[in-house]
Amino acid sequence: MPGLVHVIDHPLVQHKLTLMRMKSTSTANFRKLLNEIGVLMAYEVTRDMPTHEVEVETPLEVTKGRMIDGKKLVFVPILRAGTGLLDGFLQVIPGARVGHVGLYRDPATLNPVEYYFKMPSEMPERDAIVLDPMLATGNSAVAAVTRLKQAKPRSIRIVCLVAAPEGVATFTQAHPDVPVYTAAVDRKLNDHGYIVPGLGDAGDRIFGTK
Ligand code: URA
């Protein structure tokens, strides 16, 4: 797997992901766990963000500290399951901006079609973090990032919870410049486009819509 793919194997992330995979996990707990994993993944995905030195005055003396460069980050959940990761990310970085991408799959062509796209201003000065819990075929993530690139953010990375090898291959081939952060790369996609073993339909499990 190319160096573009970061598997976040932190024990807390893996423990929570295992609980989320269980079919007995309730909607409320699934949502809570996704939120908690969002916090932990936000921490990992921002690990190498560029910082600059600033001068600060503590109650005792003047010293130097570091702060993240540039305009506020922008989180970009892909509707609808991506919004499940958003709260955790906002808990860690409350000042971040949020852009949304909505795509649906055309039943005739199976191609992703955009129905919503709204980003904050000054995108060329912002680093974008795309949120989508399941990187399955990779087609909607590829389309979302292709569209996002038109807004010219300074950088893009994508965070998912579970990826299929097929989705990783499709995504990294289309966007080799966009690193993927995931908690797991599972065995495969099944004939219905579900990741196995996976955790089922993330949107249905977050919103209780089955
Ligand atoms: N989307 C999901 O929510 N789950 C899968 O397994 C695949 C795509």
Image (spheres, helix red, strand yellow):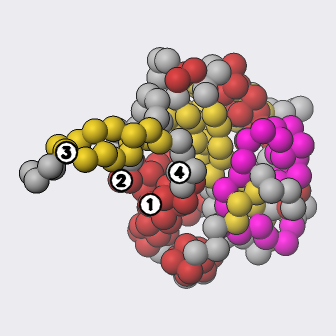
Dot 1 and dot 2 residues touching (CB under 8 Å): yes
Dot 1 and dot 4 residues touching (CB under 8 Å): no
Q: Which residues are magenta?
A: 167-188
Q: Amino acid at mark 1?
A: Val
Say which of 112 and 109 sits in front: 112
Dot 4 and dot 2 residues touching (CB under 8 Å): no
Position of the C terminus by quadrant: bottom right
Residue at 58% from the left image edge and 75% from the top image edge: 10
Position of the N terminus by quadrant: bottom right
Dot 4 and dot 3 residues touching (CB under 8 Å): no
Please determine whether, in this image, residue 32 is positioned above or below residue 169.
below
Residue labelled with disc 3: 62
Q: Amino acid at mark 4?
A: Thr
Residue labelled with disc 4: 46
Q: Is mark 2 within 8 Å of ligand 1?
A: no
Q: Is residue 56 left or right of residue 48?
A: left
Residue labelled with disc 1: 39
The crowd level at tag 4 (other Cα within 10 Å; few <14, some 14-19, many 20+) is some
Percent of width and height locating residue 171: 82, 45
Percent of width and height locating residue 51: 47, 42
Percent of width and height locating residue 208: 50, 60
Q: What's the CA distance linking mark 1 and mark 2?
A: 7 Å
Residue at 84% from the left image edge and 33% from the top image edge: 111
